[in-house]
Structure formats: structure tokens, C-alpha cells
Image (tube, coloured by chain):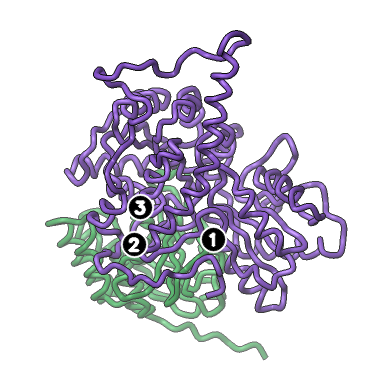
Chain colours: A green, B purple
Amino acid sequence: MYEVRFHGRGGQGAVTAASMLAAALLEEGKYAVSIPSFGFERRGAPVVSFLRCSDREIRQLTNIYTPDCLICVDPTLARTVDIFGGLKPGGTLVQATHKPLAEVVLADTVGVVGLCDAIGIALEVFKRPITNTLMLGAFAKTTGIVSLAALQRSLEDSDFRDAGLKQNMVALERGYNETTVYTIERRVAA
Amino acid sequence: MTTATLETPAQAKPAKQKVILCEGNEAAALGVALARPDMVAVYPITPQSSLVEHVAKLIADGKMDADIVDAEGEHSVLSVLQGGALAGARTYTATCGPGLAFMFEPYFRTSGMRLPIVMSIVTRDGITPQSVWGGHQDAMTVREVGWVQVYCETVQEVLDTTIMAFKIAEHHDVMLPVNVCLDGNYLSYGTSRVELPDQAEVDAFMGVKDVNWHVALDPHRPMAVDPLTGGSGGKGPSTFVRYRKGQCRGMQNSLRVIEEVHEEWAQRFGRSFAPLVEEYRLDGADYAIMTLGSMTGAAKDAIDEARDAGRRVGLIKIKTFSPFPVEALMKSLGKVQAVGVVDRSVGFRWNCGPMYQETMGVLYRLGRHVPSMSFIGGLAGADITVGHFHRVIEATEKLLSAPAPIEPVWLNEKD
């Protein structure tokens, strides 16, 4: 079982992203379940969504408390919300940011980091800061859990059409290509 | 396979099943479309809204040939459908929580008139304190009104059961309305892989529609519908008893019909769901936990872990809650020495969960003392995790050697 928690703000598509990732994993013959957080979602307010994937059928329909990976589609969120709660030691952070690694908020549990200037790219592609498809590309690059090709196929099967589909395909590919992956070396306690 | 009741039948799975990814509400809508109702009436309410939006879209896109009535409220929704059902239409709606409360007067009338309307309840907790989240309180509140009520565990089961519900409701030995209950939030919005049955196969499964043979708005055979009866004189009392006994007989008949329809579904589509009561790893168990609805997945994972750790525990899941499957549950409870019952709603009168209260009645009929206790969790959108179920398992195991607590355990009290 591999568990992912998405962090974003209302309107950035974190919930849709979890669902699109589930579709891509399904393309690859895996089982996937995504669950949105429930509440009075408002544009700009912090939201989370969850995704589980496995080679076997997934039975538990619950939130995720100890994720293997965090995907944070918003660059400012980590300053206001503890996005790292429960992250498994050595876990992965896929973060939208234009900052270098040294300036990114991290927790001790983070072992792998994928950084992507998703806002900058989104403003070029969409003229709006919609980062979700970009960050799916970044996730694929960082973890290899899903292939870029499967994500592309799931986008083609989604509700996106025409210009919207084209833009999202570009965003996905740029997210994949323009993500830098770092492994965090930690001093082993004596 | 560890579950005796879930053997896949020998028949090969039909080839024409498309695999898609969807949420529980969309699965319900797709099931409705495949069952080909003539008429739906809707009023949206959280967490049901996306269900009726999907239905409306299927109709607007020409993928579903049904009249849709956008009524001004839930009371009208069900009243409109009663007219449709009396005129011979296959009818459907969905609601929850305050919408179900507003619908209560025609809701009561539907079962008395023996109208086989199918209605999803995307279950939601009771309001006050303010809450828009899932819980079984709404469906539990109306469990004594003569509707058949079944609860689903997975998104696939939502889709399949929604179709089966029409066949159960319209069976001539039943002729009762059916609620397909799916947990608001976790199941309504949870997205997973489902197999979409082929339309022609579903058509063959449903057979020829015959829903208004017993009571009908038909100018060619005029009849009085829903007569004034009862009172203490003349034929009133006996007529009223005949109506009520008929309803009760229909409810009892439904237990058999639900089993038959599930069996036929398994034969045709290759997917088996326990129709009344599911046993999971119950053989060889000293004690059991009982669940209802989508919490069951996490419970099964917890049971597997507990079994691996040497605990002799099994699981009993109720699918059909109304009518309560007394005989089937007696068989399952007969295998264990103690039981812990997990409810996602509150029984205010007995200070326990409603399913626990029903289970105590069944335990009495067993004729031997089986220690039991009530757990209440997952209220108003709260989560019931594998960790919570480990607490349930540990507390239930203690019943084998210590007195049972009278007070319920509130699983999310310290979350």
C-alpha cells in the first residue's frame, strides 16, 4: 500500500488531482482509491485529499494519517499549515515552489524532495495559478509510482477538452520535465 | 477466500464489463441509468447533490431516457413520484438528512401504498449541532416506516445494489419501496475502480416491467386508492389490520427476494455480495465485531491483522438492516461467545447504537447469554480507522472473561 496526501488551497484542484492520479494508476493495472476532505471548501482555504494505491484490492475507505508522500500544490501552505503530520520517516515531499531546496520548509521525516516551480509554469501555460496537473507530473518524476504516459492517457480520458486538454497536457509534461529531485542526507545519530 | 458467503459462482464473468473510475454518488447514478426508470424527481442536498447532478447530466446528455422533475422540495419530490408510480412508472430519487426529514409525510405513505419507489439515502448525521457530514442517523431515524433498507460497503456495491433495488422493490411478493443507503462522504465521494455492467445484460436481468398491477391510476379500471379506514367500528379495524399485516408480510418476503436477486446478480455478472448478513473470518472465531456500511473495509483490514496476531476474532456485517435479518444473524451470532457492535449513529432511548439495540433482540432469541457491547463512531463525518477497530476488537475480547460495560464506547471521543 502506498499512501499520498495532497495539500492545496480551494480552487487549485487538489481533489481533482487525487482523482486523476487514481485514474492513471488504474490505467497501469493498479488499484487506487481517492477520498477528498469534506467541509465547506472555499477558494483559497487550505484543503486536503487522499489517495491510496496498491497491487491488491483496497478495502479501507478512510482518511490517511501516515502518508508515504505529500504533494503540496501551493507554495505558501507549509508556512500556515503543518503539512508534515504523520509523514513516514524517509517519506517524500513533492512541493510547488520557485525557491531553492535550502529555503524550502522541511520536516525531519522528509527523505526525498521533488521541487517544481508550478506557479511560474502555470502562469505561462494557463495564465492562472492552477498547479494540479503540473504537480502530478512532478509526482511522477519524483517517485516513479506512476508513469507520465499513464497520466497522459488519464488526462485524455478526462473531462478536459480541446484547448483545456492541450494546456493540461503541456502542464503535465512540463511538471515532469522541470522537477528537480533531491535525496536528503541526514546525519546518523551516534 | 476466507468468507464462506462470498464464493464466486462457477459461471464465467461476462466479457462486456467496462472498467471505470468513479465516486459512490456517480456509481449510484450510473446504476439508476442502467435500471431505466421512467421518472426521477430531485432536490439536491449535501452529500447527495452530486448524485442527482450526475442523474440530471445523464438525462441531459441523452444517455438516460427518463422524465426529470426539478421539484421545489423533498416533500414534493416524493409526492410527485407517488403519482408517477401509481401511473405505472419506474421511479427514483435520492436524499438525506434534513431532506429526508422534510419528506417524512409522503415517505410514510409510500410503503403503505405499496409503491416500489427506489430512493438512495446518501446517509448524513442529524443536524443540531450543525453538521453537513456523513453518519447513519437519518436512515436510522426512519427505520420503522416500512421501507426496505440496505447499506452498501463499496462503490461497486452501490452501483450493483442500486440496480438490484428496483428488482427487489417491484417483486410481486414485496411491492415495497427500497432505500439504498450509501455513506455520505467516505462512500459518496470516495473514488475507486468499478466494473460497469452492460446495458443489454441489465435489461435481461430486469425482465419485463410490471409495476402497477395492484393499485393504479387508470381510467379504464377506476379504483379507490389509499382509502379512509381504521377506527373502531364496522370493517375499519380489520381492513386496517389487513393493510398493516400485508406490509409486514411484504417486508418478511423481501428477505427471501433480496437473497434470490443477489444470487441471480452473481450468476449473471460474476459479482457476489452477501444479501443479508456477511461473515468474514467468522469460522473458528471466539468473538465477533459487527459493522454496517463503508466502515467495514477498515474493519476487515483490522480483523486480518488481529488474526495474524493470534486473536480469534471474526466479523459480521449487516447489509439488509430493514427488515432486520433475524434468522441469518442468529446463525452468525450462534458461532461466537461475545460480540461488539459498531454503529455510526446514536440510539437516544437505550443509550447505545441502534444496530446494537436490534442485535440484543436477536441475542435474546438465541436462548443463551452472549456478552455484548455497543460502540458508536464515525458520527458527523468522523473517521473510523483500522486503529479504532483494533480498540473495538480488544474491548470485545475482554467480554469473554469480564462483565460487559453498560455504557457505549464513543470511538471518536478523544480523537
Chain letter for mark 1: A
Q: In the picture shown, does residue B295 fall above or below B356?
A: below
Chain letter for mark 3: B
Please state the horizontal and vertical placement of residue B3, each as a whole percent of the image: 55, 69
Q: In the picture shown, does residue B305 fall above or below B378?
A: below
Disc marking residue B27: 3
Q: Looking at the image, can residue B395 be seen?
A: no
Question: For this view, does A129 lie left or right of residue B250?
Answer: left
Chain letter for mark 2: B
Disc marking residue B268: 2
How would you rate the neighbour count of disc 1 (Cα within 10 Å): few for under 14, some for 14-19, many for 20 or more?
few
Q: Nearer the viewer, residue A172 or B324?
A: B324
Disc marking residue A82: 1
Q: Nearer the viewer, residue B318 or A157?
A: B318
Q: Amino acid at mark 1?
A: Asp
Question: For this view, does B15 lie left or right of residue B337?
Answer: left
Please state the horizontal and vertical placement of residue B144, each as a whole percent of the image: 59, 33
Q: Amino acid at mark 2?
A: Arg
| SS state under label 2 | helix
Residue B404 position by quadrant: bottom right
| SS state under label 3 | helix
Q: Amino acid at mark 3?
A: Ala
Please state the horizontal and vertical placement of residue B322, each as a whole percent of the image: 56, 42
Mark 3–mark 2 distance (CA, rounded to whole Å): 19 Å
In which quadrant of the rendered image does the C terminus of chain B lie?
bottom right
